[in-house]
Amino acid sequence: MVEFRELETANIYNLALVDIKQDGTFDDMSVTNNQDMERIIATVIRTIQVFLTFKPSAKVFFMGSTPSRTRLYRGIINKYLAQAEQIYE
């Protein structure tokens, strides 16, 4: 699940990517390893695009729940940064 939660600073939103556990709680530390990372990232990017159509002046913040996930996200952002910069600030 992708969740956007407004931070204390107005108009800045934290993006959380979580799995929903059997008991309904969220888990941002799980590793499902379904070999579908590109599909998940494409879905997250599309979710950000939709979110920003409803809140065009919002700023979205996210980082990995572990250093290795932060490196993974940074690598994906770098891969698509030139395309994103044509649309987003």
Image (cartoon, helix red, strand yellow):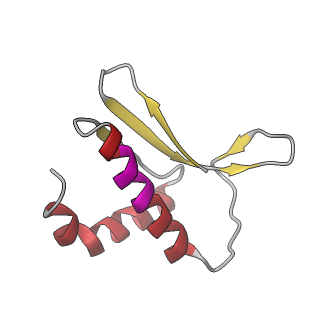
Q: Residue at x 38, y 34 (%)?
A: 13
Q: Nearer the viewer, residue 55 or 39?
A: 55
Q: Residue at x 53, y 53 (%)?
A: 66
Up-down: is 13 above or below 39? above
Q: Position of residue 62 (x, y in %)?
A: 40, 46
* Secondary structure that dominates the magenta span: helix
Relative to 42, 74 lies left or right: left
Up-down: is 22 above or below 34? above
Residues shaded magenta: 45-51
Up-down: is 35 above or below 55? below
**Farthest residue, direction bottom:** 35
Q: Residue at x 19, y 54 (%)?
A: 88
Relative to 13, 81 lies left or right: left
Q: Position of residue 7 (x, y in %)?
A: 40, 25
Q: Nearer the viewer, residue 75 or 13?
A: 13
Q: Position of residue 14 (x, y in %)?
A: 42, 37
Q: Is 38 contained in the magenta span?
A: no
Exactly how many numbered labels are in the figure? 0
Q: Nearer the viewer, residue 70 or 48?
A: 48
Relative to 23, 8 lies left or right: left
Q: Quadrant of residue 86?
A: bottom left
Relative to 18, 15 lies left or right: left
Q: Residue at x 29, y 75 (%)?
A: 79
Q: Position of residue 84 (x, y in %)?
A: 22, 64
